[in-house]
Amino acid sequence: MRVRMRKARRIRRLPAVFPVVAAIGLVVPASMNAAFASAPVMTGGPVVASVPAGRAMVADARPNWAMSSADRGGVAVSGQLDLRVYLAGRDPQGLAAFDRAVSDPHSPSFRHYLTPQQVQARFGPTTAQINAIRTWLASAGLVVTGVNQHYVSVHGTVASAQQAFGVALHDYAVQGGLHRAPSGVVSTPASVAGAVLGVTGLDDGLPRAHPADTLPGPEPVTLRADPCSTYFGQNQAVAEPFTYSHVGVWTECGMTPQQVRSVYGADSSGLTGSGVTVAVMDAYASPTIGSDVSTYAAAHGSAGFRAGQFTQSLPAAYNDVSGCGGNLWYSEESLDVEAVHNVAPDANVVYVGAASCHDSDLTDALSRIVDNHLADIVSNSWGDGAESDDTPAQKAAFDQVFQQAAAEGIGMYFASGDCGAEDPASSCNSGNTKAQPDFPPADPWVTAVGGTSLAINSNGKELFQSGWGNILSTPNSNNSGWTPAPGSGYPAAFDAGSGGGTSPDIPQPSYQKNVVPTALATTLLDGTTTPGPMRVVPDVAAVADNNTGMLVGQTQLYPDGSVRYHETRWGGTSLSSPIFAGMQALAQQAQGAPIGFANPAIYARYGTPAFEDVTDTPFGPNVQFGVVRNNYTNSHDPNSPITTRLDTFAHDGLLHATPGYDDVTGVGAPSPTGYLNSYRR
């Protein structure tokens, strides 16, 4: 699967058109459900299915677009495939149990983490398991092309794959073409089933990657039209229609490094992230990231990276650069790296680049982090889109890496998404047919970071904060008002908002018990009631609204062909994830020990001064608020016409920021006075 960045730019995937028949219809492997689950464990794939005697089902490998109505029959058996057979390890249940104990502040095993080598020796696959899998695959005619502690890669014909995995591969008419996918469940000989986590590569819903692609130069410049304000309310929009019965205010220009540290209380904490390493993971690698951070720091009077403070872990080669957006990932990297550095200026930062935006390469990059313990904190500003867009087999592969991270004391942080509930009716939806949270944020072993709108005053302190979700209006024909009425017009007028919602597949982790309201945990976004409480996203929140976001500096390509450094305002949960990762670096410095998988500690702080309870109504019920902003009709061209719009805050569609835990901001946003202090010894 091809994934997308978390800003407004989206990498399109095949549409999610496979119907989710019920809350228990599409499920994930037991290893994921058992993570912290208090609900019954569900295993397997879409029911109903059976396999021949002597075989056993493994995690389902059918993509959600493989509908029977789109089935065009079997594929040519001579076709060539490259597949991965992911390894379950010798004790997956033991790994989950260890992770629960090592992450639980009340457990005697709390923070007794393992090294990568110890994790593999205790929980990784045995030589006997690997050899048995290799023998089975070879007997079906597949050629083993590689083996590591996570998977066995193989090459062979469709005929051999069908024999090995007990399933016919069919063509499906999707998105104007034919795409291959399994027509039923995947199975293995019962003798090796316990060692197999899942199989990926049986579908070809995406173009085949092209190895050894060359990375392009800087991406086209992104320009924000004036005017803007250095703090909320500085400049009034006196020539525009009244907003909410008063003169409106222009959007903020973007927070500086000093304003970021000020609004979260980092500047007065005495903490800088010293001694902590944070990893930022995206696809590809900006060729100018080092000089851009230096230029950015100099422009704002802050410290750049010291020698050796910033490092990179990059793949030997890149692939599918054009299909994945190529240099569009550079601004994501710039945003993530600069956000972490702004919050935690003395933390070491390692940028980990994936070879492409495909799940296989992203999984490899994540594995590179945990296999070598490159960092204690990992920020990810990408995602696969709606939860049902991933096959259970691929989810299992991700989940296993996240569990290994927890065992090593590594915290995985993911942007929760920028399209609210992924409502199919909204314009920002990725093509799925059912509202649901995104994956990997819904995985129970990661910390999903949602978004807020965070306005600052002239002193760089918080003026107000609300859940992030924007409804757009434009001036009417005689410039006397706004159309649609401010705050109305969902879903057509919905622009973007914090990702969240109740998972249809993953039971409630124990850390959410007694915190997430029962009504929220047992009701899906379509109103369906679940038989037990489910995982709800996000866990926590930080600033994400582009209107109240952060200035980001980057070398970009201008329309005249020149390449120049430029600063612009960025937001999205692409910002909230590295902001919170930076806060975690400060918190880790404060407690003098790795935080590890953070969710148990985060939920233990729910309702304390550590978190600000963020709602949609900071000024009281029925009080609307927002900003006026100008946009270039072509954001790459400063000579293009300018349009004016009103962004009304705190409207996240099907999601709502309410008092207490909610599906927009989780337990809340870190308090500038209480969060870091809660970690001091």
Image: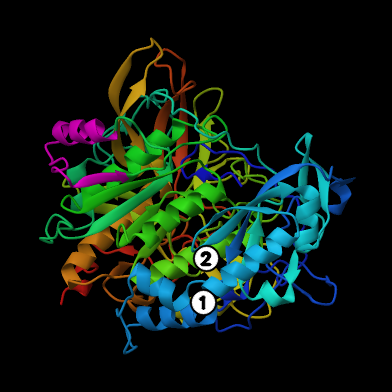
Quadrant for residue 476, please give it. Answer: top right
> Residue at coordinates 34% horizontally, 35% vertically from top-left?
569
Quadrant for residue 304, please give it. Answer: top left
Amino acid type, callout 2 = Asp
**Measured along the vertical axis of the image, is residue 382 above or below residue 318?**
below
Q: Give the x, y percent position of residue 325.
A: 51, 32
Label 1 crowd (10 A; few <14 / some 14-19 / many >=20): many
> Residue at coordinates 39% horizontally, 71% vertically from top-left?
406
Contact, CB < 8 Å: mark 2 with mark 1? yes
Q: Give the x, y percent position of residue 168.
A: 83, 55
Badge 2 marks a residue whose secondary structure is helix
Highlighted magenta segment, given as a residue range: 289-312
Mark number displayed over residue 35: 1
Q: Give the x, y percent position of residue 107.
A: 34, 88
Q: Is residue 662 left or right of residue 581?
A: right
Amino acid type, callout 1 = Ala
The residue to which callout 2 is attached is 399
444 and 140: which is toward the camera: 140
Residue furthest to the top in view is 560
294 and 226: which is toward the camera: 294
Badge 1 marks a residue whose secondary structure is loop
